[in-house]
């Protein structure tokens, strides 16, 4: 979240973040209030660093970045499987 930009919209910052994610070849999904990115921990930390710096490069004076890392070791996991799991539970 860029702070002190003089405008409430931040879609241009999200668009720049998506370009960086695409350049790294990672899967992602933009949601109304966040962006989900798939990758290993090293990739995610590297991307987070790059994305965090975007608003500064675009003139923001302050940036707040919030991350949630969901990592499983007991079975393979991806965005689609997680959504399908929730939908199956809704249908029950």
Image: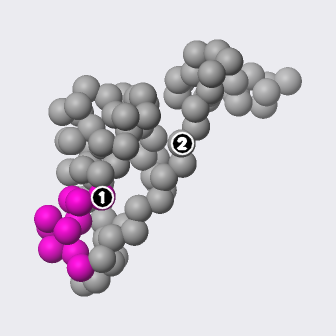
SS assignment at label 1? helix
- Spot occupied by residue 57 in the image (x, y as percentages of width and height): 14, 65
Looking at the image, which residue sits at the far top?
Answer: 75
Direction from residue 57 to residue 92 in the image, left or right: right
Residue plotted at (63% across, 22% down):
73
Asked whether residue 84 appears in the rendered view, the answer is no
Q: Which mark is residue 91?
A: none
Residue depicted at x 20% and y 68%: 56
- Mark 2: few/some/many CA within 10 Å (<14, 14-19, 20+): few
Residue 27 quadrant: top left
Reply above or below: 4 against 59: below
Residue drawn at point x = 27 percent, y = 38 percent: 21
Residue picked out by circle 2? 69
Residue farthest toward the right in the current orientation of the protein:
92
Q: Check if residue 58 falls in the magenta segment.
A: yes
Q: Can residue 20 be seen in this snapshot?
A: yes
CA separation in Å, label 2 and label 1: 16 Å
Please report whichever mark, 2 or 1, sits nearer to the chain's N-terminal start. 1
Q: Nearer the viewer, residue 21 or 90?
A: 21
- Snapshot colouring: one colour
Asked if the stretch drawn in magenta spans residue 7, the answer is no
Q: Residue at x 14, y 67 (%)?
A: 58
Horizontally, is 42 left or right of 66 in the view? left
Q: Which residue is mark 1?
A: 52
Q: In the rendered image, which quarter is residue 72 located in?
A: top right
Q: Main secondary structure of the magenta part?
A: helix
């Amino acid at each position: 979240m860029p702070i002190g930009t003089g405008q409430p919209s931040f879609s241009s910052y999200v668009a720049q973040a998506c370009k960086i994610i695409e350049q790294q070849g990672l899967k992602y999904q933009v949601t109304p209030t966040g962006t989900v990115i798939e990758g290993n921990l090293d990739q995610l930390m590297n991307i987070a660093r790059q994305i965090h710096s975007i608003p500064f490069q675009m003139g923001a004076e302050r940036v707040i970045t919030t991350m949630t890392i969901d990592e499983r070791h007991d079975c393979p996991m991806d965005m689609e499987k997680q959504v399908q799991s929730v939908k199956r539970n809704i249908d029950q």
